[in-house]
Image (spheres, grey):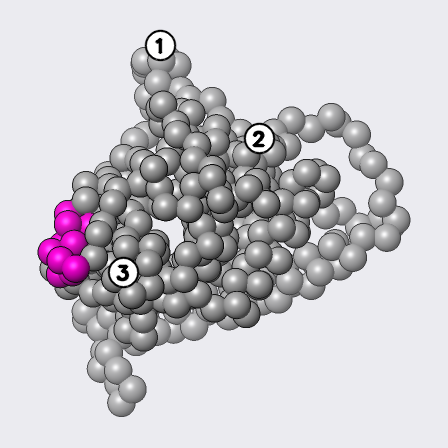
Amino acid sequence: MVSGEGKDFELVVAASDEEWLEIRKLGVGGSDVAAIMGLSRYRSPFSVYAEKTGLYKLEDISSNPAVHWGTVLEPVVGAEYARNHPDREVRRVDAVCRSLKRPWAQASLDFEVRDPELGWGVLEIKTAGWRMADDWADGVPVYYQTQVAHYLSVTNRPFADVAVLIGGQDYREFRVMRDAEDEAAVVAAVDEFWGRVERRDPPDVMGGDSPILTEVHAESDGEIKPSPDCPELDVWLAAKESADDAKERLANAAALLKGRIGDSKGIKTRSGTVTWTRSTEKRLDSKRLKAEEPELYEKYLVESVRDCGLRFKEDK
C-alpha cells in the first residue's frame, strides 16, 4: 500500500504497457504538465489535447536510446539514493495515483520516501545527457518542477526529492518543498486544460503541431468554405513575406562568404572562425530504380500523408 492511498488518492494498476497508455488518456499525468503550461521543448498543449481525445496516437519512443537507458537506470539511481540515506525508507511505486477530489489528476510515481522528520514524500528519478547539464545548474529545471508540484498536489505530500544522473556519472540530489503558490498555478492549468478536453475545445496550435494537424486532417473534402474575415491569413502572409526576404538575404550573404573562403577550409576573423563544410554523398536514384526495377520499386513504397504546405491565390 502506498502512503496516503484511500485518503487523498486511489491506486490504478496497469496490467500491460497498452493498458497503461489507456490510463494516461483518462487524465493529466506529470509528464503532461510542462507541455500544457507551454514549458516543454518537445510537446505543445495541442499535442497533449490530441492525445487525450484520441485524435492522435502518441509515438512509441520506448526504443529511443535516452528513454531506454532512462528506464534501465531508474532503479540504479533509486538504489544510490537509498544508499545515501539509510535513515529514510524508500519504496517502489508501480501504479498510478489518481486524485479522489480531482480524478483527472494522475501521478505515476517512481518511488516514495519516508523522511524521519517530514514523513512520506515523493522520490522522483531522472537521467539526463551532458548537453542538458546546464538545465540542472541551479536546481531542478522548471519543466520538472511543474511535474513535482503536480505530484504533490495529487498525493498531498509535503516534499519531493529529485535524484538525477547526468551523463552517466554526475549524480545530484535536490529537495523540493511543497509551495502553495506554485501548486495553485499548476492545479489551475491542469484543471483548465482538462475542462477543454471534456468540452472538446482544443487549445491554440503551434508551429510544431503541423505533423499532428496533417494526420488529424489527412483527407480534404474538396470544398472551399467561406471565411470572409480570416486574421490567421493576414498573420501568415506577413510572416511568409518576412521569411522569404530573410531567406533571400541569408542565401546572398552565405554565397558572398563562401566566395571569400574559396578553396580554404574557412577564415578566422576578429570575432571568431567560420568554416565551410563540404562533402560528397550517395543517394538512391529512385527514377532509375522505378524505370529498371518497377516491381522492386513498388514493393518498398510506403504510403503516408504529406503536408505540401499552404498556397494563396489573391482574388482579382
Q: Is residue 37 left or right of residue 74?
A: right
Quadrant of the image occupied by residue 300? top left
Closer to the camera: disc 1 or disc 3? 3
Residue at image location 22% in from the left, 82% down from the top: 268
Question: Can residue 293 be seen?
Answer: yes
Q: In the rendered image, which residue does mark 2 sit on? A: 54
The disc, 3 or 2, on the residue closer to the chain's N-terminal end is 2
Rounded to the nearest angstrom, the CA distance separating label 1 from label 3 is 67 Å
How many C-alpha atoms fall within 10 Å of the one at disc 3: few (<14), some, or many (≥20)? some
User: Residue 66 placed where, x, y %?
Assistant: 25, 46
User: Residue 195 placed where, x, y %?
Assistant: 68, 45
Residue at image location 65% in from the left, 40% down from the top: 197
Q: In the rendered image, which residue does mark 1 sit on? A: 295
User: Residue 246 placed where, x, y %?
Assistant: 54, 68
Q: In the image, what residue type sits under mark 2? A: Gly
Work out whether residue 232 or residue 36 is closer to the camera in this orientation and state it. 36
Q: In the image, what residue type sits under mark 3? A: Asp
| Res 118 label | none
Which SS type dominates the magenta stretch? Answer: helix
Q: Which residues are magenta?
A: 76-87
Q: In the image, what residue type sits under mark 1? A: Glu
The disc, 2 or 1, on the residue closer to the chain's N-terminal end is 2
SS for dot 2 = loop
Closer to the camera: disc 3 or disc 2? 3
Rounded to the nearest angstrom, the CA distance separating label 3 from label 2 is 40 Å
User: Residue 273 placed where, x, y %?
Assistant: 24, 78
How many C-alpha atoms fall within 10 Å of the one at disc 2: few (<14), some, or many (≥20)? few
| Res 115 label | 3
